[in-house]
Structure formats: C-alpha cells, structure tokens
Image: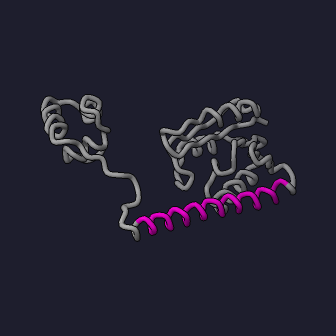
Amino acid sequence: MASIGYARVSTVEQNVDLQHAALRNAGCKRIFMDHGVSGTRAKRPELDKMLEHLRDGDEVVVWKLDRLGRNTRSLLALIDDLEGRGVHFRSLTEGITTTGAMGKAMLTVMSAFAQLERDQLVERTTAGMAAAEANGRKAGRREVTMGDWKVKRAHELKAQGLKPSDIGKLIGASRATVYRYLGLGAD
C-alpha cells in the first residue's frame, strides 16, 4: 500500500508548503499538487494525474477535506469511486479515514458541514455586495488606472517590441493593466 498525497491551493499567490509538509509527515512518498485551481472546477490536472496513478490498496491522503472537493456530492462521489477501486482515503486535519464504517459515516457528516460553510460564505459575500451597492459603493476589486504618461510610455514600449509583462515592470503596472490600456486581448 502506498500513501499518495494531494494538495491544492485556489490561487497562484497561495502557498502549498503547509499542506506539503503535513503530507510528507503523514508518510506520503508522492504528492500531487494543483496550484491556482479552485476546488469547484471539474478539471484539476494534478488530481486527474493522481487518479490515473492510483492502484488497488493505495491510500489518498489530503491535509483537509476541502482540498479534495468543495461540495458534498462531488466529494462523496469521488471517495466512493476511490473505494470502488480499492483505494482508501484519509484526511489529516479532520482525522477521518475510510478504512472503517465510523470513518465513512464521519466523512459524510464532515463533508456536509464543509458544504454548509461554503454556502454560508457565498451568502455572506452576496449580502455584502448587495449592501455595498445599496449604499452607492461598487463591490469587488477596485479598478486600477494609469496616468496619461504611463499610458503613453506603454504605447512607446509596445512599439519597440516589448512584451506586456516587461512593459508592466518598467512602468510599475501589472500585466493585466497593461493589456487593458493597450487594448490587447489577454493571453
């Protein structure tokens, strides 16, 4: 039996080191890691690779339940598929394993609470955005503007053949802002 780890962070700015260390300490020799991939997405490249790699008798280990899936239905379906293939599951933070009946029951309860937490977060976010709008404020990330001289300089640098990421570094703007002000499609 091999313990195979899976770690995931939703944004590229987040760090996977804590999960990686915990999985190594739990005995995982191989760890698959998705960076910048939401748990709500159906396609997670490293998760797909891990699923192909698994063999009968292996154990999938995650740091926390929500790293594997964000909603109860998909999480339970994935774990049911693993069990059908003879692969066990263990979540370190929640202390859940599917090697016994109690573990399977706790997994169902814990994944339901994880779904509840996610649903409440969505409700609070929606309510906050509605309240902001009702008070005349625009919710969400503020729009970044560049001064006229930066826009002019960006066009000059583009004419010289520089890439938007390099232009952004030179004028102190993000690549996305440079794309927007130069009227380019994001790549």
Could you say where residue 8 lies in the image, as x and y percent from the top left? 59, 42
Could you tell me which residue is drawn at 71 percent across and 34 percent down? Answer: 22
Quadrant of the snapshot with the N terminus:
top right
Q: Residue 87: in sight, yes or no?
A: no
Kindly indicate the quadrant of the structure image that contains residue 187.
Answer: top left
Specify the color scheme.
Answer: one colour
Farthest-out residue, front: 135
How many marks the image carries: the answer is 0
Between 108 and 55, the one lying in front of the other is 108
Kindly indicate the quadrant of the structure image that contains residue 172.
Answer: top left
Could you tell me which residue is drawn at 40 percent across and 60 percent down? Answer: 139
Q: Residue 181: in sight, yes or no?
A: yes
Q: Is residue 1 above or below residue 128?
A: above
Q: Which residues are magenta?
A: 103-132
Q: Any magenta on residue 56?
A: no
Could you tell me which residue is drawn at 67 percent across and 55 percent down? Answer: 78
Between 60 and 156, the one lying in front of the other is 156
Q: Is residue 137 left or right of residue 162?
A: right
Could you say where residue 5 lies in the image, as x and y percent from the top left? 68, 38
Kindly indicate the quadrant of the structure image that contains residue 115.
Answer: bottom right
Could you say where residue 68 lies in the image, as x and y percent from the top left? 64, 49
Between 184 and 47, the one lying in front of the other is 184
Between 136 and 11, the one lying in front of the other is 136
Could you tell me which residue is drawn at 71 percent across and 62 percent down? Answer: 112
Magenta region's main secondary structure?
Answer: helix
Could you say where residue 170 lies in the image, as x and y percent from the top left? 25, 28
Q: Any magenta on residue 124?
A: yes
